Amino acid sequence: MTKEKYQLEFPIHASPAMLYQYFATPSGLGEWFADNVNSRGELFTFIWDGSEEEAKLISSKVDDRAKFQWADDEGEEAYFEFKIQVDALTKDVSLIITDFAEEDEMDEAKMLWENQIAELKHLIGA
C-alpha cells in the first residue's frame, strides 16, 4: 500500500529561532516528540516506551525547516518535515507539518500530530 502525503498547519506564538530548536535538535525533540532522542551526525534515534525508531535528517535550514526520513521509508518518497512559516504582513508564525501515511491510517496519523503539537505548545507556553 502506498503512502499519501498530507500537510497540517498549526499557528504557534513563538519566534522562528525558538521554535526551530524544538524540532531540529535531539534535546528539543526529546522534550515533546519522543521520550528521548539521540543523534550521531544526521542519524537520529527516537525512543518511545523502550522501542526505538531511526530517522535521517535529510535537509534543514536554520530557523526555517527540518526534514527527516524514517529508516523504514528509505528508498521511498515518504518523509516528515517541520517548516516554519511567517506571514509577511501580520508576522504570525505557523508550523507546517508534512508527513505521509497509508490511506487507512490517515486520521490516526493526523490525530497523533495534533496531540504532539498540543504538547509542544504547552511546553513553550504558546
Image (cartoon, helix red, strand yellow):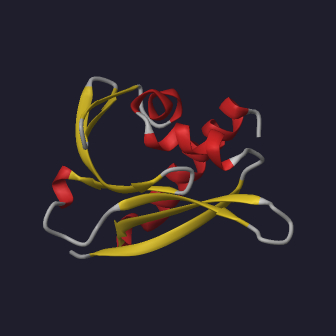
Residue 88 in the figure: left or right of residue 119 = right
Quadrant position of residue 40: top left
Q: Residue furthest right?
A: 90
Query: Where's residue 58, x and y in %?
Result: 29, 57
Q: Is residue 57 above or below residue 1?
A: above
- The residue drawn where x is 32% and y is 62% is 79
Above or below, 101 relative to 20: below
- Quarter the C terminus occupies: top right
Which x, y percent locates residue 46? 31, 34
Q: Residue 91 at what x, y percent from top left? A: 81, 61
Quarter occupied by residue 89: bottom right
Residue in view at x 50 percent, y 50 percent: 62
Count all numbered tags in the image, as a single digit: 0
Q: Nearer the viewer, residue 1 or 9?
A: 9
Residue at 36% x, 66% y is 101
- Hey, which quadrant is residue 74 in on the image? bottom left
